[in-house]
Amino acid sequence: MSENFSSTLSFYFRGLAMITALFLTNLAIYAQSNATDGALDGYVLDESGAVIPGAKIVARNVQTNIEFTANADGQGYFRFPLLRVGSYEIVASAGGFREFKQTGVSLEVGRQVRLSITLKVGAASETVTVSADASVIETGQPAVSEVVGEKQIRSLPITSRNIYNFHLLGPGVKGLPSTGFGTTQFLFGGTNRSAWSVDGLDNTARRNNRQIRLVINTPEAVEQTQVVSNSYSAEFGRAAGGQINVITRSGTNQYHGSALGLYRPNDLSARPGLNQTKPEATWRDMAFTLGGPIIRDKLFFFGQYEYNPLTGPIPVTITAANAAALKLPASDLEDVKFGETFHTILAKVNFALNSKNSGFVRYSRFTNDQPNTGGGLSTVGRGNDFHDRMNGGGVQLATTITPSLLNEFRFGINRRYELRNPVGEYNGANPAVNITGVANFGVNPFAGSTAVENSSQFIDNLTWTRGRHTIKAGVDFQTTGYSLFASLNQQFTFQGLSAVAGVRPAVSALDQYLRTVSGAIDPATNKPYAYSQLQQDFGERDVDLRFNFINFFAQDEYRVSRRLSFNIGVRYEALLFPELDPQAPFELSRKVNNDLGNLAQRVGLSWSPTADGKTVVRAGYGIFYDTPSLALPVTAAQTNGRRVLNLIVVGSDARAPKFPDLLKAADATLAAPPNINAFSTDFQIMLAHQASLQVTREITSNLAVNVMYSYSGMRFGAYTRDLNLAPVVGRLADGRPVFAGATGRPDRRFRQINLIESGSNSNYHSLDLTLTKRFATGLSFSGNYSWSHALGDNEQEGGPLSDPTDRRRDYGTRNSDLRHSLVFQGLYAPRLTKALKWVNGFEFSTMLFYNSGFPVTASTGTDLNGDLVNNDRPLFRGRNDVKGPDYFQIDLRLVRRLVFSDRYSIELIAEAENLTNRFNANCSIAGCTSAVVNVATASDFGRVTSVRPPRRFQFGGRFTF
């Protein structure tokens, strides 16, 4: 790069930052200008190719009849930067030319449609009408993105009812579909970092290591879904990976509604793998929608409700003999009535106050009740009842200040409340009891805990079009609070007693319990038999933290010519951490230092090298800051050696209470040295360098192929290192140090001091080939093949190092490495004549997922190096040096549509998930290690121990009016 160019670019970025500062003097907040809407621009030309300045262009939304007007500038260029997604009619007119009308133009969220309008000389009263969508290729933006439209959402197989599975169809996206309402597993640039939004408002749960969606929406409530995987502009941020966006449905000028019913016959479901017994499960789904005008052309409403109960009894496997010996009641041995009952609600009002002000108000709610989480060796009364409540609301107001200046304001609130209630009622004499290998009963030690995540967000931005420039700038403020109320563990364990030569034979765990209850005397000690140990917690149960996010951006889309445009921007992000605990005994557990220098530059280009506009080259590079898992500071605030005192009492200790009594008060002399978490003083927010190069070619008016190379380099990833290691007492043959375990730790107040540092690095390279046909002549499909390789020295989520003295020993294939991936979706609605006319009215759709397998890390199964972390690999073996089993799933849907009139129709639906009943290991984007036997010395190394659900069918119908 030349010195002059570097200087110019630096000046440009500084100028944009100054523009942002000027905007902020008049603004409250920032927004993503295409987070909820589409954009439409283009050029008006005459038949010779000369521009027509001053031409009038009207864009009319067909569903709402709302019109927007723009005028072509001196270069014949016009732009509608904010248009609600949907179908549009475009009319262009100019003095001395025939009126031009184009119908069937579809706008998708986050997409910029470009039209080239040619006016013919003639009377204005004459109209040239074209019925065609815009080009199938996008020429205006460098971002790597994919939109799934309403037709696909209503028609593709989705037995799980999880709309986020559709996002796996996009280029640059890897992952695994969810088989229920759990979160679809995504990878962007070899990492699971992502930001989620609904209608342009944040919908991300950031408390856990993997960022997931917060409030859930179901397919009947969704109009479009969008995923942006690389090179997105400065208006998007807060993730070093991808952006996932859902647009909910809105009302129109016509009353429309639907009633959907689905049922899953258990008899037709295949038996689970690994010779498991098929549970007597039940599943059904009912969904209703209604939308229409309140005031035609002005005010519209849409509402949706879905009810989705699931039952899946889990057997209690305690043997009859053991149950009798323990005198467990029959009610505690019945099948656990596990299940989930989902209720989903959406209410939305869209409005156009006048020609300059429009927007929406939305409320969403999702609830889930799980009646019991017991089963196996745990009795019915040992389970928890789980209650999950999610609520979200949003408001948007878009204002046209002048024809070239627009403002967009949003406000949103999200709240998730989780409660775990004990199934059994605690009466002071029934704490948790674990009899190893026999039974677990009593009150669940984790019962009574609650978690509340709530956030409020303000967004505002300006969009200013002037000459060849479209400048956007804005600011976003969000505050997120976590209130956690933890349970205090009270748990007795009976593990059995070893033989005492010449005094007593070995005593089983069951006999130990029975003899303890009866008060029998142990001949080895001449004292009553006792439990193996009691774990009991004392201390503060609640943690309440609040995090503040401040972000702003400025960017310029500069159109050099009709065929070349640049997008150059800068974004600033700040995460303000709360004070964790000023009374924490270890200083580094008291707070997290704020990293305030997060300025991210981004640049992209879009170039049409051919005059016909059928080939587009797009490229982008940028810095993207992440939001770290808020579980890291939350855990540090909880696990700091002060809030909770964990007491472990051996049953033979003279101070041990008699079973089933508990300790009356905390006794610090019984407490084991705690593990604590802390933060490095130079902790930084992780960032990614993202880059992509794409070449897209239009094959036909509805078919395009895209070839893409993408890169992502993560820097300053979080990892954990123990500061309180015992002395080195030796070396393994491959040079790794061996520590003295729990003996001789420098700070005897603690066991492990887990210091969270930033400095982990990873690199990702990918090649993607995508073929897309949008819906026309009854057919649409999209297929994407990807080769990729992800390398790194840690998973960058705060996990421990295998060698706490050398992070480089872990450099190798990442858990998320997925060399080969193939996804495909297709929809066919025949439009035949003559002999095969009877086929019309059927719809066939499918989704296919394949990957070559996530890696497996071979383990020793022991703490080989004595650091008290069981994550050691065998000698001279690298991380993830074994490839796990591949994955294949094909889903299918068959629909028969019966049309009674222009307004009424019925769809008869049959669909299947995992149609071929493929035996798929239950791997995840965190690798396949947990789904197979991974102890290197095991004779069955690699044997699958956990599988995904088998084939299942469901049937139903949808009535639409």
Image: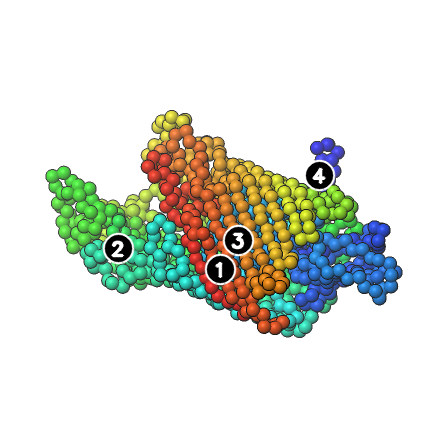
Q: Which picture quadrant has residue 94?
A: bottom right
Q: Residues within 10 Å of mark 4 (few under 14, many from 20)?
A: few
Mark 1 vs 4, N-terminal side: 4
Q: Real-space Cα distance between discs 4 and 3?
A: 46 Å
Q: Which residue is mark 1?
A: 911
Q: Which residue corresponds to mark 2? A: 318
Q: Is residue 749 above or below residue 224?
A: above
In this rendering, does residue 504 appear at all?
A: yes
Looking at the image, which residue is at 54% across and 65% down? Answer: 896
Residue position marked by numbered label 4 in the rendering: 10
Q: Amino acid at mark 4?
A: Ser
Q: Eyeballing the image, is 882 above or below 316?
A: above
Measure the C-alpha gap from mark 1 to mark 3: 11 Å
| Residue underneath mark 3 | 847
Q: Which residue corresponds to the image point at 63% horizontal and 42% vertical from the top-left?
A: 707
Along the viewing direction, whichever of 378 and 316 lies nearer the viewer: 316
In this rendering, does residue 245 appear at all?
no
Q: Position of residue 729 (x, y in %)?
A: 35, 28
Tell me which numbered mark, 4 or 2, is placed earlier along the sequence. 4
Tell me the SS state at disc 3: strand
Frontmost of labels 1 and 2 is 1
Give the quadrant of the C terminus: bottom right
Q: In front of the other: label 1 or label 4? A: 1
Q: Are marks 3 and 2 in contact (CB under 8 Å)?
A: no
Horizontal arrangement in the rendering, residue 59 relative to residue 728 (left or right)? right
Q: Residue at x 15, y 43 (%)?
A: 505
* Residue 488, position as x, y percentages in the image: 35, 54
